[in-house]
Image (cartoon, coloured by chain):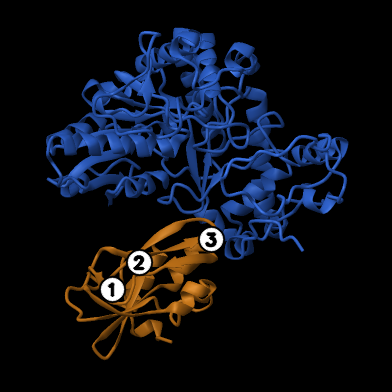
Amino acid sequence: MKLIFEKSISGRGQDIFPACDVPEVLPKVELRKTTAHLPEISENEMGRHYTALAKRAHGVNDGFYPLGSCTMKHNPRINEKMASLPGFVNLHPLQPAHTVKGANELISGLEAALCEITGMDAVTFQPAAGAHGEFTGLLLIKAYHQDRGDFERNEIIVPDSAHGTNPASATMAGFKTIEIKSNENGMVDLESLKEKLGPHTAGLMLTNPNTVGLFDENIMEITRLVHEAGGLCYYDGANLNAVMGIVRPADIGFDVIHMNLHKTFSTPHGGGGPGSGPCGCKEFLKPFIPGLTCKDGKEYTRAEKSIGNMTGFYGNFLVMVKAYTYILTLGAEGIPAASSNAVLNANYMQEKLKDIYPVAFDTTCMHEFVLCLQDIYKDTHVSALDVAKALLDYGIHPPTMYFPLIVHEALMIEPTETETKETMDEAITAFREIYDLLRKEPEAVQACPQTTPVLRLDEVKAAREPVLKYKFD
Amino acid sequence: MFDPKELKYTKDDEWLGYEGDIAVVGISDYAQHELGDLVFVNLPEVGDEVVAGEAFGDVESVKAVADVISPVSGIVEEINEDILDDAALINEDAYAAWFIKVKEVGDTEELMDADAYDAYCAAR
C-alpha cells in the first residue's frame, strides 16, 4: 500500500482560502522560509487512505486482544458520548474558574472516586500517561525527602519483574535504580529487599499484583520494611484492574500511586486517544502536588511546595470525562465486580491452557498469567514469537511476548473482564490447535502468519536501521 | 577471538578473559542466543570506573534490554567501538565481540570455568 506522501500530487491540496487581498501583518518572529511538506490529496482519497489503514489494524473493536499488562478492555460508547458534549468539548483551559464550574466539579468528583478506590487523599490529573504518572510520583517522593532536609536518599528499589518504565522513571527523576530479585514464587525476595534497604533508600516501586499476575502475599511486610528504613512506597497502578474496589493500595502501605485511566478505567489507548496517568498520594505529600487545582469553584490555587507543572493546564481533560463516566456507570457494585470478572477470566484461560503450555508460576492468578514456552522451544524450536504470530491467523491479537524478563519464552495473557466465555473458548481452541500443529509440523507454525495483510516483518532491520520520516526528493 | 574453554563466566552470563594484566569482558554465546538479534549496545567511556557485580552497560534486542554486569572492578582501558556500530557482531561471534578491556583490576566476582558454566546453562 502506498504512503500518503506517495499519493500526493502537487496542486491537489485542500486549500480553500482565496488569495489574500489585505496587507499581510505578521509578528516579528522567526518564520519558516519554505512551505511545510504536507501531502496534497483530495478529501475523498484521504478518507479512503485512512480507512484502508484502519482495516489493516487490529483493535478491541475487531477481536480478542489479550495483550498482557495492557488491559485492553472494551471502552463503553457512553464514555464517548459524554466526552463529546459541547459543554466539555468547547472549553478553553484559560477560562476563568467561575465559567467552568461543571468541569471543575467533574474533576473533583473523579478525584474523590479515585481516592475511594485507592485509599489515597489527593489525586493530580496532570500526568499525561502512565510513565508520566510514575515520574510525577517519584518527584513527590524526592520533594518529600528534600523538604525534610534529607538529601542522602537517592536510591529507588525496583524488582527484576518490574515494567521497564520503573527504572526509566527513576532515572529521569534523578534516582539510582537498585534492582532486587524475585523469589521462586515470582514474589519480592524479602532477604534481597532487606539487603538493599538503607539510609540511601528513597522508596520502593512495586506493581501488585505483579507482572507475573500474582498478588504479593508479603506486601504488608514489604511496605513495613521500606517505611522502617525511611523510604516511601510507590504503587505502580498498571495492574489495578485486578483489585479495584477490593484492595486499596493505601491500606497495604503505599504512599503514592499512579493509575492508568486509559487502561483500568476504560478510556481508549494504543492509538485510540491520549492517555491519562493521574498520580494519587497520601495527605503528607499533598503540599508537593503539581499544577493548579480549583476547589471552591472560584479560583485556582497551587500547592504550597508544589513540584511545578508536569504538563500544561489540567491534564487530558476529556479522558477524565470518559473515566468518570465509566466509574459512575459501574458504581460501587460494578467496580469490584469488574475486577472479580477480570480475575475469573484469566484463571479460566489459565486452567484451560496449562496442561499443554506450562504456566510460569502454577498457582491461582490475578487478572493475567504468564506461560513459559521454554521447554516447547527446546523440543520444537517453535518460540513464543512463533505462537504469537500464529494467533494472528485466528484474528486474535497476540499476548505480550518476552515479558516479564524473569520468564523465558514468555507469553503474558490478560483477557480482561469484558470478554465473553465464547470469545475465550475460541481463543483457547486457537491456542490448542497451534499447539497440535507445533508438535506435528513445527515449520508450519514458524511460517505463520499466512492470512494477514503483511506477513513477518523484519523487526531486527526496523530496529537497527529505522526510517523515521519520509524522504522527500 | 577468545577460546570459550579458556574463559571464566558469571551467573549473569558475562565472560572474562585476560590479555596480560588487562581483563577483557563480553557476553556468552548462551546470552546472545537468549536475547536474540541484538540491535543496540551501550558501553561506558574509556577512563570510567567499573565495579564487580555492577552494570557497566546494556544490550538491547527486539525482545528485551539486559544489563551487562562487570565481573571485575577496575578502570576502562578500551571499549569495542565496532559493536556500538554493529551489535550484530555479538550474535555472530560472542567470543570475538568483546565489550570492554579493564586495567587496574581489583575485586573479581565469583566465577565459573567453562564446564561449570555449560552445566549451569544446561540446567536453566
Give me the C-alpha separation between circle 3 and circle 2. 16 Å
- Colour of chain A in the image: blue
Question: Viewer-proximal residue, B96 or A372?
Answer: B96
**Res. B18 image quadrant:** bottom left
Q: Nearer the viewer, mark 1 or mark 3?
A: 1
Residue that lies at the very extreme toward the front in this rendered image: A23
Amino acid type shown at disc 2:
Tyr
Q: Secondary structure at mark 1?
A: loop
Amino acid type shown at disc 1:
Met
Which residue position is annotated with label 3? A378
Label of residue B120 in the image: 2
Give me the C-alpha separation between circle 1 and circle 2. 9 Å
Residue plotted at (63% across, 32% down):
A272
**Res. A146 image quadrant:** top left
Please rate how many residues cluster around mark 2, counting C-alpha atoms within 10 Å: few if below 14, some from 14 to 19, many from 20: few
Q: Are marks 1 and 2 in contact (CB under 8 Å)?
A: yes
Taking the image as shown, residue A315 lies to the left or right of residue A22, namely left
The percent position of residue A11, horizontal first and vertical second, equals 87, 47
